[in-house]
Image (cartoon, helix red, strand yellow):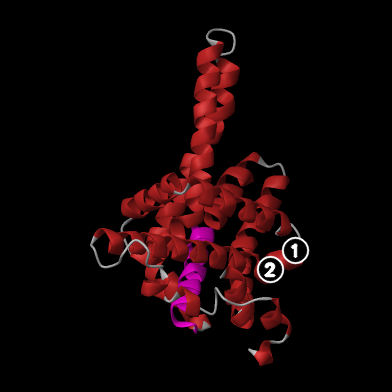
Amino acid sequence: MAFWVMYDHLGKLLVANLLWASAVAVPGVLGLSVLASGEPGAGLFIALPLLVLSGAILLPVMTAGLAHMAKELIDTRDGSLGDFFQGIRLYWRKAAALGVLYWTAAICLGTSVWFYAIHLRDSVPWLGYAISATALWCLVFLALTGMLLLPALVQKKDGIFGTLKLAALLVVDNPLFSAGLAVHFLILAGLSIVPPFLFLVSGSLGAVLATSAYEMLARKYAHKQALAEGHLSPATKRDAIFGDEQDDYLNRGLRDALFPWKG
């Protein structure tokens, strides 16, 4: 699904990705440049606010715009760059709050991973390693929930804690699916080191991938709910609800990519 969404709407997603990358990269690069100067005052009062603005605020806010755009492309098979700006307008407050919460939790957990193992190794090493290991697993879980966080926000339109709860429950209930999605994001992160890829498609592709993953999970649970309410027999496929067999995002192959005019 993610591949064909990108394939069908590449032009508008390229433009959205350029806006996304520029908004995040400009304050981030400035902050890193100031930090590299080695001036403690400049690092504290200039670099730190710029890095917080880039990573904890602008990154989730701009990504929420991409997620909303991806949602419209999946739901309606059409959309425009206006959907990107609409997503920013609708969700910037919640996205920024989620970004600050996530980065705060990540910094606390990341610090705990080494702090307790180092500082308790002489007195109670087993306790220090246990706390560090727990913090590490919590950090991994935080990263996994982060993949589905913004799609959950733009799909359910819930509050901050409702969104956090939904993303966490999706990961807990679908561990293998989440692990596979994480592998794709790790590959994407590796490719994003290359500047052309970063500015061309990395953000849009990540948002489309996460939104497509959320869409498939939503179909799974809607099907389960329909079975529980007696609307479907256990043998009925999900196609009865969503028309998966007619969903062109799910039923195209290499021929459609090479010869789109023959579709």
Q: Nearer the viewer, residue 211 or 122?
A: 211
Q: CA distance from mark 1 to mark 2?
A: 6 Å
* Observer able to see residue 73: no
Name the disc covering residue 195, or none.
Answer: 1
Main secondary structure along the magenta-highlighted residues: helix
Can you give x and y, in whole percent of width and height, for residue 214 in the image? 46, 62
The quadrant in which the C terminus is found is: bottom right
Name the disc covering residue 199, or none.
Answer: 2
Report which quarter residue 10 is drawn in. Answer: bottom right
Q: Type of residue at label 1?
A: Pro
Q: Nearer the viewer, residue 44 or 151?
A: 151
Helix, strand or loop at mark 1: helix
Q: Within 10 Å of the Cα at label 2, are there few (<14), some (14-19), or many (20+) other Cα atoms?
A: many
The quadrant in which the N terminus is found is: bottom right
Q: Nearer the viewer, residue 242 or 218?
A: 242
Residue at image x 24%, y 63%? 230
Q: Which residues are magenta?
A: 57-78
Can you give x and y, in whole percent of width and height, for residue 156 in the image? 34, 64
Report which quarter residue 91 is drawn in. Answer: bottom left
